Image: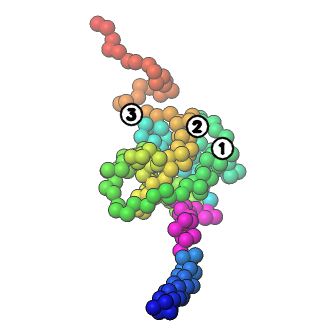
């Protein structure tokens, strides 16, 4: 009985040793995968490559418009608002931020554009390149978590981009001496074309 028991125990130990030898390498390979998931680089939102932006129009849903183009000296000239003075280097730097925009979330199910604020965008940017190509970037509403915006480039799928990245660029439209575009107010009176009404002024009916 003792010899049979001893043989049985040795057989069990041998089987366990074989199992450990086969399973241990697999456990060592799987462990880092569980603890350290493979990092994936977020895709760049707008891959400009080596192309040069020669003109752009930036706008927001508050009526601000900033329109500029490169002049013959490769400096930015602001066409709208008229008379706006803003450092060309600052505009160049602001536009360079586009190449840092990365996709935070890709939408598995394409949302309706109206549901994410893209039929009436919060911001819009139209870029013109040296080869005549045009790219349009539309920014919709803020996502429920408050960490990003719904964004669409041309007719590409809607994605989410961090709120900080978007605001860092598009704050330019309301700070670089941009003003709301005035609405037509009927036939102008001769000699009155240069008169501007201050934004805070309130017009009241004339007293009888």
Left or right of 196? Residue 141 is left
Helix, strand or loop under label 2? loop
Asked which quadrant contains residue 208, the reply is top left
Left or right of 132? Residue 71 is right
Helix, strand or loop under label 1? helix
Q: Residue at x 56, y 80 (%)?
A: 24
Q: Residue at x 35, y 61 (%)?
A: 110
**Which dot, 3 or 1, sits closer to the camera?**
1
**Mark 2 Cα shell of 10 Å, populated few (<14), some (14-19), many (≥20):** some
Depth check, front residue: 180 or 22: 22
Start-end of magenta stretch: 30-51
Q: Residue under circle 1?
A: 90
Q: Residue under circle 3?
A: 184
Residue at the left extreme of this rendering = 208
Is tag 2's residue or tag 3's residue first in the polypeptide sequence? 2
Is the residue under label 2 in contact with that under label 1 (CB below 8 Å)?
yes
Q: Residue at x 42, y 46 (%)?
A: 145
Q: Residue under circle 2?
A: 176
Depth check, front residue: 3 or 70: 3
Does the rendering let one see residue 46? no
Q: Position of residue 192 (x, y in %)?
A: 46, 24
Report the Cα–Cα distance between label 1 and label 2: 10 Å
Q: Residue at x 59, y 57 (%)?
A: 99
Report the Cα–Cα distance between label 2 and label 3: 24 Å
Q: Position of residue 116 (x, y in %)?
A: 36, 50
């Amino acid at each position: 009985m003792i010899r049979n028991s001893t043989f049985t125990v040795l057989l069990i130990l041998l089987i366990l040793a074989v199992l450990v030898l086969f399973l241990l390498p697999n456990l060592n390979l799987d462990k880092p995968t569980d603890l350290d998931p493979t990092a994936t680089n977020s895709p760049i939102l707008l891959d400009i490559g080596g192309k040069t932006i020669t003109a752009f129009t930036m706008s927001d849903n508050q009526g601000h418009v900033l329109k500029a183009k490169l002049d013959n000296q490769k400096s930015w000239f602001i066409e709208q608002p008229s008379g706006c003075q803003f450092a060309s280097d600052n505009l160049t730097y602001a536009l360079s931020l586009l190449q840092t925009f990365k996709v935070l979330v890709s939408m598995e199910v394409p949302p309706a554009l109206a549901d994410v604020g893209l039929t009436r965008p919060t911001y819009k940017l139209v870029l013109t390149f040296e080869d005549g190509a045009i790219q349009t970037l539309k920014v919709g509403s803020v996502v429920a978590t408050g960490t990003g915006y719904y964004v669409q480039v041309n007719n590409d799928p809607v994605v989410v981009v961090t709120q900080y990245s978007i605001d860092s660029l598009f704050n330019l439209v309301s700070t670089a001496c941009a003003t709301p575009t005035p609405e037509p107010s009927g036939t102008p009176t001769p000699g009155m074309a240069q008169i501007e009404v201050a934004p805070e002024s309130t017009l009241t009916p004339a007293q009888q």
